[in-house]
Amino acid sequence: MALKDKLLTLPKKPGCYQMKDRSGKIIYVGKAINLFNRVNSYFRGAHDYKTTKLVSHIVDFDYIVTKSEKEALILEYNLIKEYDPEYNRVFRDDQSYPYILLSAEKEPYCSVVRLKKTGRYKGKLFGPYPNVGAARNTVDLINHLFPTRKCFPLKKELCLYYHIHQCLGYCVHAVDDQELEKTRKDIDSFLSGDIAGIIRDLKVRMQKAVDQLDYEQAAQYRDLLRDVQYVAARQDVQIRGREDFDVFNYAVQDGYIAITGLFIRKGKLLSTHKFLDYLIGDPENYVSSYLYQFYQLNKDPKTLYVPSVLMPYLDGAFDFPVKTVTKGNKSQLFKQAEENSLAHLEQHRDIIEKKERYLIDAQEELKRIFGRPIHRIELFDNSHTAGKETVAAMVVYKDLKPSKKDYRLYKLEEGADDLKSMKEVMYRRYFRMLKEGSEQPDLIIVDGARIQIEAAKEILGMLEVDIPLAGLGKDDHHETNYLMDSNCKKIEIDKKSNLFFVLANMQDEVHRFAISYHRKRRARSVYRSPLDGIPGLGEKRRTMLLRKYRSIAAVRAASLEELQQLLPEKVAEAVYDKLKGEDDAGKLQ
C-alpha cells in the first residue's frame, strides 16, 4: 500500500506510531491522542529542519492503538527503550539526579545515591541535588557537623574520627538510643533546610574556642559556619510554608525546545534542571514524554505543577498528583521556569546548531568516501603488556555520537600477537552478530593499518560478512595520521576537516577504553594470591588460614596434617599441592 493511501486508514484514536526508513528500521516513535491527525501532520505544510530531515527518511510506518493517552505514553517510552530510534534523542540521556540517603540503620550515616525505579532504599531520601559534587559536598559537611558512622565495616578499635569528635565510637561503645535518635533528627533537620539551630551552636562553639585561646579550633568552627551559611544562601525562599513540589515549564523558539524544572523542598528552591533539544512534533507531546521519562529515573514528587496545556497529556500518567495553577506564588514559579527556558535557548542554541552542522559535514564526507550512508560505526583496539592480560575493546558511534550502552570489552587469549588478537575479537563479535541477528554496523574501523586490516578482512570474509572496513593509522608521535581502506590504500582526508577531528576523537576513545580495561586487569593480577582459584577455598577459609599463619610463606611451610586440622581433607590437599608445586617450581628455576 502506498504511503499516501496508508495515511488515510489511520484511526482517530489514541496510540503510538513508529516511523520506518527504507531498510525497515524504526527511526522515530511518537504518541498521539488522535493518530490520524498527528501522523498526517508530518506530511502537510512546512516544518523545522529536524522534522523535515525525519520526514525525508520515512518510507513506511506502523501504529498501535491504545485505550487512553496514559497507555500511549507508557507504550511510547517502552518502544523507544526497545528500539533506540535515532530521532528520539530525549530518551537517550540519563537524566537521573543524585540524592542523599539518611540511613535507617542503628548507626546513622549519609551517602549519595542515584535512584533506580526498581531500587529500594532503607532510609530517608533528600534531594534532588543539582549535581553529584553538590551532594557529596553536603555529605562531607554533615560528616563534619554530626557524629555519623564513618567506617564500613566497623573497626575493632577507636579511630581518629572518635578522637576529633566526629563519631560516637560505634565500633567499641554501646551508644545510647536517645543520643542516636537525636543525631538522626539533627541530620534530618539540616537536610530539610532547618539550620538556624546549627548556626547558633557553631557560633557558641567558635566563641568558646576563642575565649580559651584555641584559635585553631575556632578557625575550624568558622569554616564550618561559612559552609553552612553558603548552603543556606543558595536556597531562595519561594513559598510560604514548607511544601514539597516540582514545577516544570518550557519555551519553544525557531525549531528548538528548552525545558526547565524547579525543585521546591520545604518551601525552598533546592535545585533546577534544564534541557535543550531540537523539537520534533508538537511541544505538548514532547514535554509530556520528557516528563514521563524524567520520573522513571528520579524520585516522585509529592506534587507536580505543569502548564494547563499539558494536563490532558498527563491525565492519569503518574501515581502522584499533577496540577496547574493560574495565580499566586506558584504561578510566579511557572513564569520563572519559562524565563529560564528562554534564557537557556538564547545562550545554548548556537552551540547545538554548530555541533550538529559539524557532525553533518563529517557524515557527508564519510558518505562520499564509502559511497553509502554511514550511521553506525564500530571501532576496535587491542591492549596487552608483553602478551599478558590481553584485551580488546569495541566502541560504537551512532551518527558520529558515542553510544556507550553498546560498548563491549573482550578478554583475549594470553600470549597471542596483535594479528591473532584482532582475528579473535573480529570472529567473536561478528559470529555473535550473525547468530543473534543483531544490528549490523555500516562501517568497521580497526586501530592500526595493514596488518590489522588484513586480519579483520580475513575473518569477515570467512564469515561472509559484507561490511565496509577501514583502519586508522598513527604517525611517529602516536597521533591520528591517516585513514586506510580495506585494500590498504590511504584515503586522503584534509587534516583540518571536521571528519579528521571526529576520527581522531574516535581513535582516542577506543584506545582509552581498551587501555583502561587492560590496566584494571593488570592491577588485579598484581594483587592475586596463590590461594586464589583453589576449589573449596572461599573467602572465609582463606581468612581463617591467614589469621592463623599470618603469611603465605607460613601456610606454604605447614604440613598437610596441620592444614587438615583447619580445612576439609580434600581442600587441605588442594592447598598443600598448589603451594608445594609452586615451591618446587621455584627451586627448579
Image (tube, grey):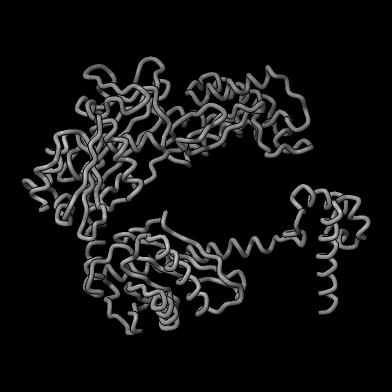
Q: Could you tell me how many numbered marks the image carries?
A: 0
Residue 435 makes an appearance in the image? yes
Q: Position of residue 26 (x, y in %)?
A: 26, 52
Q: Would you identify the image quadrant in which residue 447 lies?
A: bottom left
Apparent side of residue 72 relative to residue 113 in the rendered image (left or right): left
Apparent side of residue 565 relative to residue 276 in the rendered image (left or right): right
Q: Quadrant of the C terminus?
A: bottom right
Q: Position of residue 584 (x, y in %)?
A: 85, 73
Q: Would you identify the image quadrant in which residue 446 lies?
A: bottom left
400 or 317, which is in the foreground? 317
Residue placed furthest toward the front: 1
Q: Position of residue 217 (x, y in %)?
A: 65, 32
Residue at position x 32%, y 36% from top? 74
528 or 153, which is in the foreground? 528
Q: Is residue 201 above or below residue 523?
A: above
Residue at position x 45%, y 31% from top? 127
Q: Is residue 178 above or below residue 147?
A: above
Residue 474 makes an appearance in the image? no
Apparent side of residue 190 relative to residue 578 in the rendered image (left or right): left
Residue at position x 34%, y 38% from top? 293
Q: Would you identify the image quadrant in which residue 21 lies?
A: bottom left
111 or 158, which is in the foreground? 111
